[in-house]
Each structure stands twice: as structure tokens, then as C-alpha cells.
Amino acid sequence: MLKLMLYPSSMKNTLRFTALLMACSFWCAILDAQLNFSYTAGKFLLKGTVVDLRSHKPVALANVAITNTGRGVTTDVDGNFTMYVGPRDTLKFSSTGYVPKVIHVYDIDSTKYYTLEVLLMPDVIKIKDVVIYPFKDVDGFKKAFIDANGVGKLVINGIAAPKYTNNIPHAKFYNPISFLYDHIKKKSSANPDFRP
């Protein structure tokens, strides 16, 4: 049986007031975070793009970290980033497949604060050719290859393997003319002087 609980009107007003109070406190917290200038005190906005050195294509999802504080941002799909930096900060740009690059903020020209372009060099490591065996060494592979008996054979239950040959027997259906042709062909191959 479903029970319906009815609140008195004063209880409804209390719930509404509590919900309104929670919404206002949440809104005030957001405003305080947006108006908190202590984070940006002494800092300035830096905008730029991280680009591949060879192809000049943007590097998506590259990491831009401030090494002094450990904070950082990630570039978007177009390689763009925006962050607040201090004049004594050191920036480290890194991405998978690229050599990391370190830039000191005081080395950046003030005219490039909104158009900074950081070039990352691809990191290429050339290694020797590698042959992978499923054995400890080449001798173990050779031994397993020579000892491989029954590899590639198909066993069907109910059909016996041939006793004296490795060839799988095939059913031959002959008409009388084909039988005579094969019979004459065998005789001619046995006796080169045979004339039918």
C-alpha cells in the first residue's frame, strides 16, 4: 500500500527557503571565485599556439606547465592555450612524440604576449631491427621447427588416415571414354613405342 505523506504548509515553506538559501550560497561562491584577484595579482595573460616544427601543424593536447608552481593547462585541438603567468615563471611545453621545450617568461617579448608561437621538435628514436622468436634462442626455434610433427594436419573424427601414403585420396568418377584414355595414357608412358 502506497503511503502519501503530506507536509504542512510551514514545512513546505521551510523546504523552499532551504533550497533558495543553498542556491544563493552556491551563486555567491561562484562570484567570489570569479572576483578573486589574488590569483592574478602581479600576473598577466599569455596566449599562444603550440606548433610542430617541421609541418607547422598545431599540436593538440600538449601540456603547458609552470615549473615553479606545478600548475598548467592543456592545449585545445587547434594547439591554442591561454593562461596567467608571472614575470619570473618558467614554462615547460611537452607532448607525446616531441622533445620538451622550456621557456622563461622574462625572455618573451611583450609584443608576443597574445600571439606566442611555440615550436616543438618531433622526438624520433631510431633503433636496430629486432627479430622476435617465441623461443629462448635461434637454436631452440630450429629444433622446434624440425621436431614439428603433425603441424598443419587436419584430423576428422570417423575418417581413418591413409595407411601407406601421405596423399589424401580423392574420389574418381570416370565415364568409359575417360577410363580408356587414362588406360592408354599409362601404357604409352610405360612403352614409348606403343601405338594405339
Image: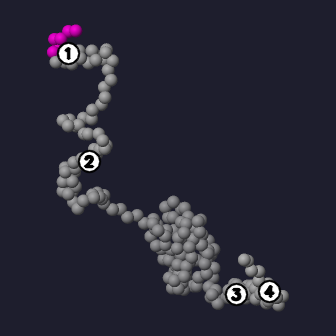
Spatial CA distance of label 2 from label 3 is: 72 Å
Residue situated furthest front in the rendering: 1
- Earlier sequence position, callout 4 versus callout 3: 4
Q: Which residues are magenta?
A: 191-196
Kind of residue indicated by mark 4: Tyr
What's the mark number on residue 188?
A: 1
Residue situated furthest top in the rendering: 196
Spatial CA distance of label 4 from label 1 is: 112 Å
Residue at figure coordinates x 21%, y 48% from the top left: 149
- Earlier sequence position, callout 1 versus callout 2: 2
Which is more foreground, mark 4 or mark 3? 4
Secondary element type, mark 2: loop
Q: Which residue is mark 4?
A: 7
Kind of residue indicated by mark 1: Ser
Q: Which residue is mark 2?
A: 151
Asked whether residue 154 is in view, the answer is: no
Secondary element type, mark 1: helix
State if disc 2 and disc 4 touch (CB < 8 Å): no
Q: Main secondary structure of the magenta part?
A: loop
**Residue nearest the viewer, comparing 179 with 41:** 179
Secondary element type, mark 3: helix
Kind of residue indicated by mark 3: Ala
Residue at figure coordinates x 53%, y 85% from the top left: 69
